[in-house]
């Protein structure tokens, strides 16, 4: 049985429930798992799922076992995770910060930008409370938490700003993508990528209906207004296939990590995608 895993944030839920509701014809049987992104990253290191959401920051460490898929990606463009602190708290050089996981893209960028910070890792839903309680001095909010957080908290730094400064660019910020196990036969992998793309196209075409279904079933953690805002940010037409600019953003992330010794070799996004040209050659 194929195992498909994604995060529980609203954009992943939105894009993948077109599969779960049977709106597209996906190879069956398959199991469906919604897990926090760091759990998914850790499981990807073990090769747990056939198809899994991952942080782009993790990918160079699993490239031998997983290929990158083009659909169901999340990029920031002028927005993204936020470093927050209490209003009455100024941050020292070695401030204590809560991050959502060692292998998340935001954690990679944060550690490069704030090398003296004392990092602890927490489930992403626990970060806001840890900052409010004083357990940590600051935290990086991800997913829907960036839209609505406690009034006693303020944004110290946008991770988008960190990204632009580190890369000296305004390329799209690669946050999350989908990876497919390389042991899956190529023709089957190509078909799976096509179906995932179709699922997102159909989800976007019927966004209001699907959003209402998710809200009625309590499958998302936000209200209708925040859901619409979040989907506009992270589940939109650019989520169907990678653009040239998005590929450049992924390459900039990989190059940044390699320069700082986080990856054993420099890789290029294009070399890690499923070669769908194979299908045209096969049936030509």
Image: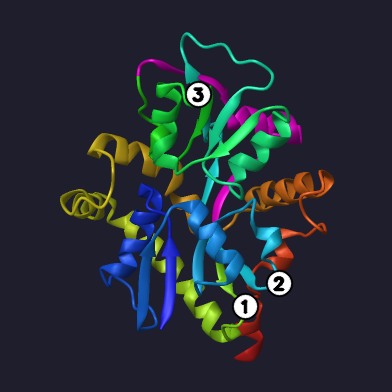
Q: Which residue is identified by label 3? A: 84
Which element type, helix, strand or loop, lies under badge 3? strand
- Dot 2 alpha-carbon crowd within 10 angstroms: few under 14, some 14 to 19, many 20 or more: few
Q: Position of residue 245 (x, y in %)?
A: 66, 48
Label 2–label 1 contact, CB within 8 A: yes
Q: Is residue 166 left or right of residue 10?
A: right
Can you say whether 93 is above or below 30 in the image? above
Which element type, helix, strand or loop, lies under badge 1? loop
244 and 133: which is toward the camera: 133
Looking at the image, which residue is at 31% across and 62% down?
Answer: 17
Q: Which residue is identified by label 1? A: 182
Of the two numbered discs 3 and 1 in the rendering, the one whose residue sits closer to the viewer: 3
Q: Which residue is identified by label 2? A: 64
The CA distance from mark 3 to mark 1 is 38 Å
Q: Specify the label residue 69 is tagged with.
A: none
Which element type, helix, strand or loop, lies under badge 2? loop
261 and 16: which is toward the camera: 261
The CA distance from mark 2 to mark 1 is 8 Å
Which portion, as a residue range, is magenta? 151-177
């Amino acid at each position: 049985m194929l195992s498909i895993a994604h995060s529980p944030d609203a954009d992943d839920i939105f894009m993948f429930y077109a599969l779960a509701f049977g709106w597209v014809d996906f190879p069956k049987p398959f199991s469906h798992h919604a897990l926090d992104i760091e759990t998914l990253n850790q499981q990807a290191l073990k090769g747990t799922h056939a198809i899994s959401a991952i942080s782009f920051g993790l990918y160079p460490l699993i490239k031998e076992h997983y290929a990158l898929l083009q659909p169901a990606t999340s990029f920031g463009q002028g927005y993204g995770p936020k470093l927050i602190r209490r209003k009455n708290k100024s941050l020292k050089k070695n401030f204590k910060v809560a991050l959502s996981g060692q292998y998340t893209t935001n954690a990679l960028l944060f550690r490069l930008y704030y090398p003296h910070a004392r990092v602890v890792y927490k489930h992403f839903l626990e970060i806001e409370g840890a900052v409010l309680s004083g357990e940590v001095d600051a935290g990086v909010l991800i997913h829907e938490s960036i839209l609505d957080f406690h009034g006693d908290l303020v944004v110290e730094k946008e991770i988008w700003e960190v990204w632009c400064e580190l890369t000296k660019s305004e390329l799209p910020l690669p946050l999350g993508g989908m990876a497919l196990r390389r042991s899956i036969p190529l023709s089957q992998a190509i078909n799976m990528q096509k179906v995932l793309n179709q699922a997102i196209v159909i989800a976007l075409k019927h966004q209001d209906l699907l959003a209402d279904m998710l809200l009625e079933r309590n499958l998302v953690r936000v209200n209708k207004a925040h859901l619409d805002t979040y989907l506009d940010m992270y589940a939109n037409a650019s989520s169907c296939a990678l653009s040239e600019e998005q590929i450049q953003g992924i390459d900039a992330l990989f190059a940044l990590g390699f320069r700082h010794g986080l990856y054993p070799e420099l890789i290029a996004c294009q070399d890690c995608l499923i070669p769908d040209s194979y299908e045209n050659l096969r049936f030509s």
